[in-house]
Structures are given as C-alpha cells and as structure tokens.
Amino acid sequence: MRIGVTVFLTDQTIGPAELGRALAERGFQSYYAPEHTHIPVSRATPAPLGEPLPDYYSRTLDPFVTLATVAAVAPGIRVGTGICLVAQRDPLLLAKETATLDLLTGGNFDLGVGFGWNKEEMADHGVVFGERRDMVREGVLAMRELWAEDVASYQGEHVRFEPSWSWPKPAAGAVPVLIGGAAGPKMFRAVLDYADGWMPIGGRGLTQALPVLRAAAEEIGRDPDTLRVVPFGTEPTPGKLEHYRNLGIEEIVFNVPSGPADKILPVLDDYARYVERE
C-alpha cells in the first residue's frame, strides 16, 4: 500500500522543497496539494468542515508550482492535486500544465479533481454554481482530447476550441484523473463516465460504498478492478490501514495539519511508522 500525505502549504508554513525532502527521508510515496485561488471576504457559503474557515485556505500556494518543487527535490515521490478546481481553470492551460508536470516527473503525477464548494470563489471566476459539475466533466474530456490527439478539438456547452496542436503530451498518453468527494450516485456516475478513480474524502463508509461503485461499473461493462480508490485526508491508525488493505485499497493519503516545520515534521515522524510496516 502506497502511503502519502496532503497538507495545505502557504507562505507561512514549511516550504515545498523542505517538505519534499522530509517526505523522501521518511519513505512517504506520494504528496497531494490542495487548491483555492482566493477566498472572498464577503463569503456566505458555509465551510464544509465548519466555521471559522482556517486562514490557510486564503494563503494556499499554487498547486502546480508546489508539486513541481516537491518533485524536483524528491523525484521518487508521486505527486498529485487534492484537489484541483477544474471549473475555475481554463482547460487549455490546465491541459498544458498537467501534461508538462506529468512528462517532467516521468508519468508520476495524478490529477485529483473536484467540483468545489465556495460559491463566491466560483462566481469570481464566472462559474455558475449549479453548472460546475458539467464544467468539470467537459474540462476533463477536453483535456483528454488535448493529451491524446495530435490535432485536438472539443465542442461542448462550456468548453469549445477548434482543431489545435498542443504539446507536450503526458508520459503515458494521459494523466490519471481521480475525482474527490463523498459517495453517492452523482459521484459514481462521474467517476465511471470520465475518470480513472475516486478519492473519498476522509475515507469513511468504504465498506458500504465500494460494492456499490463496483456494481455500477459492472453494469456499464467497465472492469471495476481498473478503478483506483484512494482514501484521502484520513487519520491513520493500524486498524484502519489493515481494514483498507482488506478492501483492496492500494494507496492512502494521510492528512497533515498545516503549519511551520516544527509543527509538521513531528507529525511526519509519527506517521512514518506506518510506512515502515510496508
């Protein structure tokens, strides 16, 4: 089982280079970076984990610059977004960024995507909240065209571009796409429609959810064994890891509190004992 971590890095926390070296020294195998472009002061949308919204949401480093830095100092570590707010990004630019990062890491990159929760943040990007799921779908499908085809085009309701050239291409022809969020019919339809796997936030309820996802995959003729399921942002315990292993989970991402080095490094030291058992 691959053991990774996610942590909000900001201008006030440990830096990505120091974090990358610390992860490599302790044997961690993946790092996922979150994303928020900004947090409007007039926000009315309630925070999903409760109020007040932590300050690090408004100070988050750009995920792609962060991941490139981590990968440069720790080339053996797989990097990914956890998660990228696709609806708030231009898919032509995002296809270029993701393909470049994947190529430069030798295919060691996962694109974790999400639909988002902050209506005010989305509105500043011109995103209608009720349309965000369709926008994410079209964005991913458009990127898949750009990654795969020498001459790519896409004509959707939200994403449109004429036949175009776009290089580089990802190392293996496509970037793996994982959708983050809670279990449910909408989530599983999205995963089976245009993604390579699911990132259940917190990792609860997998005993009940995984059979439902697998059955849904079989119904449409998709091999459920090809779906990656990566419990994300969970708190580690020996029993939990053994439970995930018995469910066939091959990667888990631990949540590490945001903070300076003297706060984060002891947590990594503690979590490293789970890596050593692998």
Image (cartoon, rainbow, N blue to C red):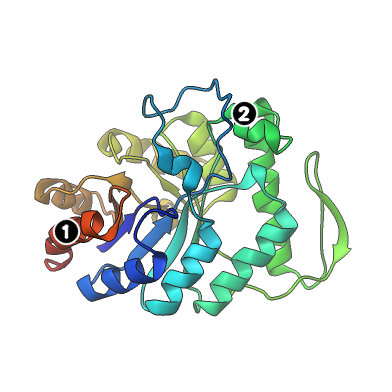
Residue 93 percent location from the top left of the image = 71, 60
Q: In this view, does 230 lie to the left or right of 115?
A: left
Q: Is residue 191 left or right of residue 130?
A: left
Picture quarter with the C terminus: bottom left
Kind of residue indicated by mark 1: Pro
Which mark identifies residue 266? 1
Let me know if residue 269 appears in the view: yes
Q: In this view, does 265 lie to the left or right of 199?
A: left
Q: In this view, does 9 lie to the left or right of 257?
A: right
Q: Is residue 68 above or below residue 248?
A: below
Q: Which residue is drawn at 40% across and 43% down?
A: 214
Between 232 and 208, the one nearer to me in the picture: 232
Q: Is residue 267 above or below residue 21?
A: above
Label 2's element? helix
Q: In this view, does 246 lie above or below 149?
A: above
Between 71 and 260, the one nearer to me in the picture: 260
Q: How crowded is mark 1: few (under 14 residues within 10 Å), some or many (20 or more)?
A: few
Residue 146 percent location from the top left of the image = 73, 64
Q: What is the distance, in whole Å, between disc 1 and disc 2 at their CAs?
A: 36 Å
Q: Which residue is drawn at 69% across and 40% down?
A: 135
The first of marks 1 and 2 along the sequence is 2
Let me know if residue 176 appears in the view: no
What residue occupies the far right of the structure in this picture? 162
Picture quarter with the N terminus: bottom left
Residue 44 percent location from the top left of the image = 55, 20
Residue 26 percent location from the top left of the image = 21, 71
Kind of residue indicated by mark 2: Glu
Q: Residues within 10 Å of mark 2 (few under 14, many from 20)?
A: many
Between 74 and 195, the one nearer to me in the picture: 74
* Residue that label 2 marks: 120
